[in-house]
Image: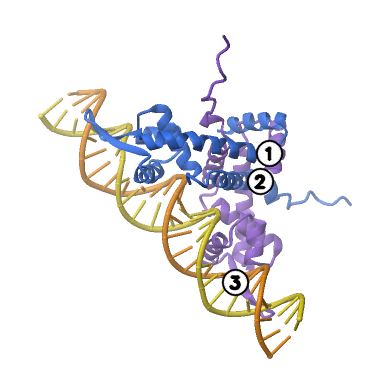
Chain colours: A purple, B blue, C orange, D yellow
Amino acid sequence: MSSPPPPESFRLEDHVGFLLRKAYQRHASLFLEAGVEHALTPTQFAALNKVVELGRATQNHLGRLVAMDPATIQGVIRRLTLRGLVVRTHDPMDRRTAVLAPTEAGLILIETATLCAQRAHAAALAPLSDDERALFLSLLRKMG
Amino acid sequence: MSSPPPPESFRLEDHVGFLLRKAYQRHASLFLEAGVEHALTPTQFAALNKVVELGRATQNHLGRLVAMDPATIQGVIRRLTLRGLVVRTHDPMDRRTAVLAPTEAGLILIETATLCAQRAHAAALAPLSDDERALFLSLLRKMG
DNA sequence: GCCAGATCGTTCGCACACGCACGATCAAAC
DNA sequence: GTTTGATCGTGCGTGTGCGAACGATCTGGC
């Protein structure tokens, strides 16, 4: 009598990966839109923010803090140094490492960029109520 | 007396974009790990899944359904056709479009790939309780 | 001292992801 | 019919991501 459980119960639209990709893309788009003037990508912003926060950091260590591969952080830092937002020096005690620090321009830029990041944050969460936002962020942190 | 409100209230770790990026990366990693044998990326899986579901679709239309740019879906479909999972034909009524359909191999592969996707889905949501999972997914859908 | 293993940063290759510009084609308006 | 505007797929440039391999360097144990 009873029909067997539907074998095709899979829906792409309910898949975490699909929803995460869409939400991630949406935020990236809002972020770029909010910061056209200085044109930092979300990734570059994350890296620069951390460099400013630390004042001084090793490249791979920084990468771990902002969830980027050594191969990835390398390109991000290269672009930030080309734009004069970060300087690379060396630790005489450890000749393997690259020591990163923000420049004056980097310190200035991060101020306005942070405001844009906050706008993008709010815009991305706009579809949710205040309670839902707090809940969503806490769940998202648990997924880390 | 009272200290001014902290001007540095911004924390990268509480930023939606940062958390979304980490969660997205985590799922992608779990997905690849769950499906090493057939080696479909999450993106390729989404596209192939939709092609199978539709049976027949136009390239850009498909891209819209799976949230991919025309420039992006082009590369994804190219790789799927190179692997013989999808065929490209043409609509004689509209010579602009590329009409996509799954091949036999594509239909076979999507079966096991779907199981892997479900495993990755479960693994990514593992840190959450059942209630939290449902809640998280519904909030994520609202962000779409 | 020396050697084994770890860590550092780089490079290559591949796969998304998107803006932009382009030629081709279709549809609608005239 | 022809023109106008939209849509289709493609190509290029740039940026993120990561696995794999590499040479250079540091560290521990011997």
Mark 1, mark 3: which one is toward the viewer?
1
Amino acid type, residue under disc 1 in the picture: Ala
Confirm or deny contact between disc 1 and disc 3 (CB under 8 A): no
Calculate the distance from the C-alpha at mark 2 to the C-alpha at mark 3.
27 Å
Q: Residues within 10 Å of mark 3 (few under 14, many from 20)?
A: some
Q: Residue at x 68, y 42 (%)?
A: A143
Amino acid type, residue under disc 3 in the picture: Arg
Element on which disc 3 rests: strand
Q: Are marks 2 and 3 on the same chain?
A: no
Q: Does residue A132 appear in this view?
A: yes
Classify B124 as above or below A73: above
Q: Residues within 10 Å of mark 1 (few under 14, many from 20)?
A: few
Element on which disc 2 rests: loop
Q: Residue at x 53, y 30 (%)?
A: A13
In the rendered structure, find residue A132 and report the number of the disc placed on it. Answer: none
Residue named by callout 1: B126
In terms of sequence position, does the residue under pointer 2 or pointer 1 come before the other?
2
Q: Residue at x 40, y 41 (%)?
A: B73
Question: What is the x, y in percent for residue D5?
Answer: 29, 32
Question: What is the x, y in percent for residue B142?
Answer: 59, 30
Residue nearest the observer in this picture, B112 or C15: B112
Residue named by callout 3: A88
Q: Are marks 1 and 3 on the same chain?
A: no
Residue nearest the observer in this picture, B2 or B122: B122
Residue named by callout 2: B15
Calculate the distance from the C-alpha at mark 2 to the C-alpha at mark 1.
22 Å
